[in-house]
Amino acid sequence: MSHALVLRHHEEDHIGLVGDALSDRGWSLSSYLVVPGMDWPPLEAVDLVVVLGSKSSVYDPEVTASWFGEEMTYLRLADAQGIAILGVCFGAQALCLMSGGSVGPAPRGEVGWLTVSIHDADVPRGPWFAYHDDHCHLPPNAELLGATPEAVQIFTIGRHFGVQFHPEVDGAQLRGWFAAGLDPRSETPEALRDCEFADLQIDTLRSNVSQLVAAVLANAGLN
């Protein structure tokens, strides 16, 4: 059985629809909350590392000194062992940085449901939920697969796959973020509409995520 190891950065985060798509394909999953000084889990029998989002920035020196430097060392170890990485939002930025690219503030942040211009990739245009203020400047060995005017949205680097948006989210995940205060828009009409949209479009979201996960696994040679 193939196994995915998930790195979370907040108690409220979960692998959500991405985990469902992997489970539907017979994968097992384990999940770990990243904290300073943690004992990093062994990588034996791991086929895919999934790195979820964070409200932190990958270029914040205090974050790097506290815990992100350790996470980057761990991701480089996974890469050296030939383990594929799926980076989501902050995770995609970590993948970009690890591979020789850079990350900085985006011209404009993106919050809410969006569609992506796809560049020769078998990935749906959306809807995808975005929540970020930063932008990846990809290294030369990356392949751009999708973008919006504001940011790189989908890319590969070898067997690794990065997405700037959040394919894992459903209405329950969004409400969890709002309840925890991770989203300053909590209780606003816009936030409530985002949750309602996720509830109404859940079948479309599941289908989109299934296609995305298929592309991730195909790129990694794991399908």
Image (tube, helix red, strand yellow):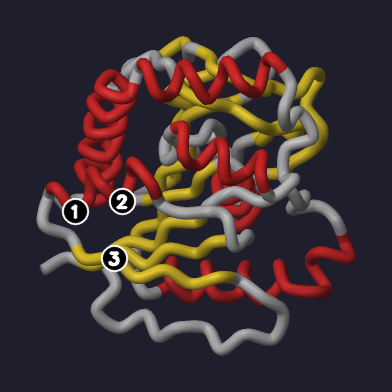
Q: Point out residue 169 in the picture as x, y percentages from the top left corner.
A: 46, 37
Q: Is residue 203 above or below residue 178?
A: above
Badge 2 is on which residue? Answer: 19
Marks 3/1 in contact by CB < 8 Å: the verdict is yes
Q: CA distance from mark 3 to mark 1?
A: 8 Å
Amino acid at circle 3: Leu
Q: Find out whether the residues at labels 1 and 2 contact each other: C-beta distance under 8 Å.
A: yes
Residue type at mark 2 is: Gly
Mark 2 in CB contact with mark 3 (< 8 angstroms): yes
Q: Residue at x 38, y 46 (%)?
A: 16
Q: Is residue 217 above or below residue 121?
A: below
Q: Mark 2 or mark 3: name the one nearer the start of the chain.
A: 2
In this rendering, would 13 be left or right of 58? left
In the image, residue 199 sits, relative to residue 84, either above or below, namely above
The residue wearing badge 1 is: 23
Which residue was labeled with disc 3? 29
